[in-house]
Amino acid sequence: MITKIVLDGFKDRTQILELGRLNLLVGLNGLGKSAFIEGLIFCLSGRVPAGKSRDLVAECFPPRGGLVRVIDDEGRWIMRGIEVDHQEARVSEIHKTEPEEAEGAASIWECNRALLDFRYFVDLSAAKRRDFMLDLVGAIGGKLSLKKGRDMLLLGFAKELGGKGADETCILDTSKLPEKLRPIGNEWPKLWEYVASFDWPDTDASEALTKILEIAKEKKNEARLATKATKSALSELTVEKRGAEIAAEEYREAEAAVKLHEQILHDQRTLAKDIERIKSRRDAAHEQWKRLTAACDAKREQINARPTIEAPVGEEPEFDLAEAERVLGSKVDERKRLDRELGEHKVRLSVLKSSREQLDADRRALAAHQNQPMGHMMDALHGFSEYLDDSDRRSTEWEDLKSCCEEVAAGWRESVHKQKERIDDQSERLAAMERTIASANPPTDDQIKRVQMEIGILASNVERLRSGHKDWYSQLRAAQQEDTLRQQLAEEFARLDGELLSVEKTFKAEEERLTELTGGVPGEHVATAEKNLADATSRLEKLEDSRGAARAYAEAKQRAESAQSRERAWTAFESAVTDAREKFVASLTDPIKADIGEVLTAIGRDEREYLELENARGRPAFNLGWQLGDSRRSINALSHGEATVFGVAVAVAIARRARGRKLLLVEADRIDEPTLEALLEGLTKIQDAFDAVLVSTCHYPVTFHGWRAHEFNESGEVKSVDVGYIERSRSSVPLETKDA
């Protein structure tokens, strides 16, 4: 455990800070808390925040230089500083330990750099962070049986040859591999038989994979030497190799000659067929040319046979046809009006006559019947009274009867009077109608005949004008139609003439092609090609017996290729072992995640850690951070306070596995007070993982225990107190302290 930090001029401070295992450095910013933390880092690593060069280190000391000393609980110490010689302008480094350490030996003051400066780990690239984690757990392993090792390495060997999507089946059935990789895949049974022949008890996975890796490297080197030997032996066969090459070359030439003459024969036969087709097309073009020539001649004769129709001379005649038609129409309308007026006059006369006859009939009927019903009624009344006696005549009923008859008679007379008045009124209206008809002036027959004669004259004139107009335009249309027809015939003739020229061009092209192809007689070319093919085939048969040297060379070459396949197989197997070991080691990161989760739980965080060393496609990757539910945030995406809390958890996991001193240095100024209290409480539960814990903050926690508090005041003094259990309000006075 580190118990004391002594500053002599570092950051302008000359002070001693006595440490416990858990140390809380409290005070406002700028009072010197960071000087002790940075001094501790410098003493153990030789680094200051700006870097490691002597000039940068000298900036942290006064002009004369200075020292930083760290002492542990066993009295051992390390001292580091600089000495400045201004006369010689030289800066010398001071570095001493007690007890002195042998050169090249491991230092008891060694400390993992990520524990001294967690930002160093955060700022590493993803690949370097991954290597950091693998180095951290590389010496730890599980058990690996023979069967498990075979299955794992078979899968790795398959992926080395067939890619990430391959599985064991492509090695067990090499027909699934590309043809050039099948010889390498066929080497697997021999590879595994050799590896499995060694004593293979259930052993540590790391040791087992390391042993297999050594075997693979050894066999790869042997295969490489065998490949070189076979290639060397092959190159030493100078004469045999040359003879084999010459024989193989001659045989290849003979084979090529046979194929060439076969192709020539095929081409000559194809050429003969092409010539026949060209002749057929030429004859067809000639027939088409003759047909088009005849059609052109016929069309020319048709054009010459057309009659010549001249257009009417002069401009269009000005006929006053519209005026004549208008006058004729007005006369026709006048005749219709006269007929209508005469018809209306006759209708009025007929109505007047019938009305007069009806009026005379009504008068006669009224004169004949106006007194007859009343007279009969009175005669019947007098005749009835003769049968009555005097008393009956004086009776009331009789009087009433007489009175009733008299009233009926009076009503009848009034009705007759009104009917007479109606007849008189109607007679007056008829008289007025007669006067109106008499005063009217109806058209006479002579007037109607005169209008009809004028209509006939006008109709004849209009017909004459129409006939002249129609003749002129008929002649004009006939001339225009003839011109259009002649133009169409000329266009048809031009089209036929164009087709004729095209056919002539095609005919000439076919003739030229035929002349080009038939430089000789096609049948002779085919016969020559057949003879050449027979000669080449005979030569190939003779060379068949001289291929022994070529076969020997091919066998030697095959042995060289087989040795090369074994070399490539052992190389792929070595890669598979390396990859398997790396994956096996990667599976050992679970304890690291468990340590990080333990710290997060102790601090009271709900987030859970995640650590991945491979991506979804099985390629190397590094993903580290925490997640809440499905929401993930990498360590680089955390806020400063969150990164501080998570960095403490990661530092605990590193400290439990790293060599050397176990230190935890935390700058907690940006953590809020509840989180700071939870952090302090959680660190008390895992303090045994560290030689010393230093937490620097500008906040006074409300509740904390088990810590040594170091209060920095504005006067530059540091006061320390061991806190068993303190609960204080945020408004209370500072802690009771004793001088450091």
Image (cartoon, helix red, strand yellow):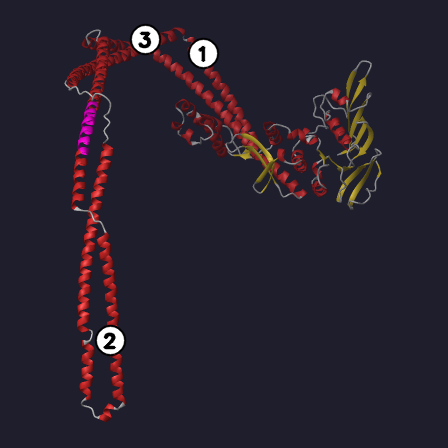
The residue tagged 1 is 232
Tell me which numbered mark, 1 or 3, is placed earlier along the sequence.
1
State which mark lies toward you, 1 or 2.
Answer: 2
Indicate the secondary structure of the residue bearing disc 2: helix
Q: Earlier in the sequence, mark 2 or mark 3?
A: 3
Range drawn in magenta:
461-479
What quarter of the picture does the C terminus occupy?
top right
Main structural element of the magenta stretch: helix, strand or loop? Answer: helix
The crowding category of the residue bearing disc 1, from other C-alpha atoms within 10 Å (few below 14, some 14 to 19, many at least 20), is few
Question: Is residue 475 inside the magenta stretch?
Answer: yes
Q: Which residue is mark 2?
A: 412
Disc marking residue 250: 3
Q: Any magenta on residue 436? A: no
Of residues 390 and 498, the one nearer the viewer is 390
Based on the displayed image, in which of its 4 quarters is residue 650 positioned? top right
Q: Nearer the viewer, residue 468 or 342?
A: 342
Residue 621 falls in image quadrant: top right
Quadrant of res 124: top right
Look at the numbered disc 3 and give the secondary structure of its residue: helix
Instruction: Kindly identify the amino acid type of the residue bearing the numbered disc 1.
Output: Ser
Q: Spatial distance from mark 1 to mark 2, Cα to Cα?
A: 167 Å
Residue at 24% x, 34% y is 323
Residue type for callout 2: Trp
**Which residue occupies the foreground of this view, 474 or 184?**
474
- The answer to whether residue 204 is seen in the rendering is no
Q: Position of residue 387 (x, y in %)?
A: 18, 90
